[in-house]
Image (cartoon, rainbow, N blue to C red):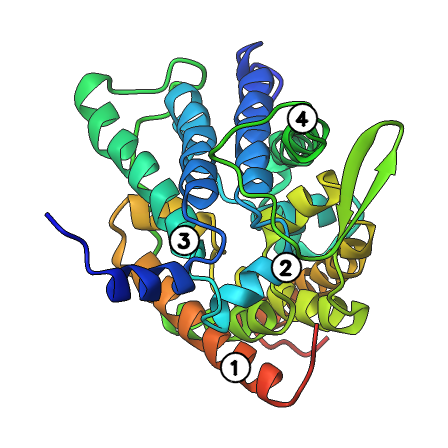
Amino acid sequence: MVADPVLLQAVAELFPNGISRYAVGGLLVGLGTVVIYVGTGIPAGASTFLESTLSYVSGQSRFQRYVGSRDWRLVFTAGIVLGALAFAATVQSGAVTTSLYEPGTTGRLYEVAGVTLWTTDVQPWRLFSGGILVGIGTRIGKGCTSGHGVCGVGSASKTSLVGVLTFLTVAIGTAQVVAALGVSP
Amino acid sequence: MADRHPLFKPLIFVGGLIFGFGLGFSHMARPEVVLNFLQFDDLGLPFVMFGAAIVSGVAFALLPRIRDAAPLTGTPYERRLKPFDRNVLVGGAVFGVGWGLSGICPGAAYASLGVGNITILWALAGMFLGAYAQGYWRSHSRARDTVPASGD
């Protein structure tokens, strides 16, 4: 089979950082979900942590339904943070190298105690106001990119498929408008 | 729940570690990379979300045929099915605006802190504020719905 070089060029432009880091990362995200599901039967999502953790400090009745799961959700989230730190200390720092990982050029790298860390250039007002909407939206909409996007879609749940299509479409529209208004990064 | 299996939390922790490592490796912990997808500059993101969904989907489909219940909890293996109502559309749209504006979602935001992104604390503060606002509102609208009007 002879590949069309023009077509290959077009495909390469859609994936300037290759696809292996995305595919491998996605497999690991799925594997983390599976490990928890195999042992516990829980299809874990990341956004319920917000409400369950608020139940420690707020007496609002809405949060009390998560009292039973708040401890393990704290453990899950601590695992996510430390797993990402383990990535930073190994692959991001160059201590472990693999051809499957494309470093990328976004944001800024800095070093603390021999570990290469990374921080974003996206402006704080975008992160803060976007975060507020994410906090409201995922909780009203019953899930986020992991709850609906990974566990829900993996369950072939119609509700989750509709949820994912909704937030994906709206997010693409929003990001296009924000970019067209000249906001960068 | 004090009577949980002693390995319950360690297993959740290990799952979280793998999950977070994957989010770091895939660069989903970088808001710029998510925004690059939403602006069609780099279409890598679907490989992460749907790749993960395929892996979890295989487990969700196979495990109920192999065993009835999970060993550490006794919870039956079930798919993640949530009832559909208008909230899924309204909440999804609000989340979509936030995601498109900031490039962050909950799991990726926690992982972002782990890769050293101190600036992400703005997003985490916003997410807790937003989750609190909706919880406050829903606590009170629920109270209005369920408590019958009385003269006190």
In this figure, which residue is indicated by the disc labeled 1?
Answer: A176
Q: Find the distance from the CA under tag 2 to the CA under tag 1.
A: 15 Å
- Quarter of the rendering containing residue A76: top right
| Disc 1 secondary structure class | helix
Q: Can residue B91 be seen from the camera position used here?
A: no
In this figure, which residue is indicated by the disc labeled 3?
Answer: A148
Q: Find the distance from the CA under tag 4 to the CA under tag 1.
A: 34 Å
- Residue contact between numbered discs 4 and 2, judged by CB atoms under 8 Å: no
In this figure, which residue is indicated by the disc labeled 2?
Answer: B31
What is the chain letter for disc 4?
A
User: In the rendered view, does A92 fall on the left or right side of A21?
Assistant: right
User: In the rendered view, does B47 fall on the left or right side of B36?
Assistant: left
- Residue under the image location 49 percent in, 32 percent down: A99
The furthest residue to the top: B6
Q: Find the distance from the CA under tag 4 to the CA under tag 2.
A: 21 Å
Q: Position of residue A9 (x, y in %)?
A: 34, 63
Q: Residues within 10 Å of mark 4 (few under 14, many from 20)?
A: some
What is the chain letter for disc 3?
A
